[in-house]
Amino acid sequence: MTNKQKMYLIGEIVNTHGVKGEVRIKQITDFVERFDVGATIYLEKKPAEYTPLTISASRRHKGLLLVRFEEYKTLNEVELFKGLSLYIKEEQQTELAADEYYYHEIIGCEVISTEDEEIGTIDSILAPGANDVWVVKNDAGKELLIPYIPDVVKDVDVEKKRVIIEVMEGLFD
């Protein structure tokens, strides 16, 4: 299915697992329920060409998700999916609270200190536990870790793709 509609990245297939058609997925969404049994997601086989897939089994294993699709039952059928990305349609997005954001809204935002110093650009997001951690790359290519907590993140403007942070003592040590 070629689709002009806006699609949102939720995961990447990093490998296969076993012989029964399971794939190992790196989750790129806070919403693990996107991978619940019965859910429909979309595999991008070619740029802007999406194939709908229905999840028939899903479980967590060693920090990744192991998922099987109703449409594919064997290792040979899913072998070609390695390295491909998984998406949802815009209407599948969940309504968020006022201070919550989708990863795609945050990634790419410019990070500025409360003293108007340019810190870098948000490159990715880690979800290690209690709060997300934003990975910021500065002009020198160095990665800085910014915890998404009220003491540090003071303002998020997804329209302007700009985040204001308070650089607390020791934050970048």
Image (tube, rainbow, N blue to C red):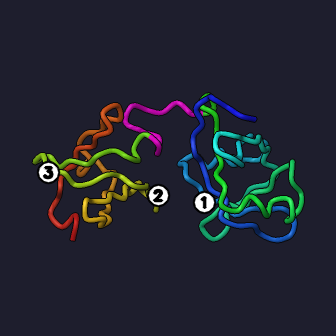
Q: Nearer the viewer, mark 1 or mark 2?
A: 1
Residue at 22%, 54% (x, y): give it. 119
Determine if the magenta segment contains residue 103: yes
Q: Is residue 7 above or below residue 86?
A: above
151 relative to 128 in the view: left or right: left
133 relative to 49 in the view: left or right: left
Q: Is residue 8 above or below residue 128?
A: above
Residue 172: x and y, percent?
22, 66
Q: Which residue is mark 3?
A: 117
Check disc 1 and report its element: helix, strand or loop: strand
What span is colored magenta in the figure?
Answer: 93-104
Type of amino acid under label 2? Ala
Type of amino acid under label 1? Lys
| Distance of label 2 from label 3 (alpha carbons) | 26 Å
Residue 107 or 4: which is nearer the viewer? 4
Residue at 67%, 67% (x, y): give it. 61
Q: Which residue is mark 1?
A: 26
24 relative to 97 in the view: left or right: right
Label 1 crowd (10 A; few <14 / some 14-19 / many >=20): some
Q: Kindly identify which numbered label has been placed on residue 127.
A: 2
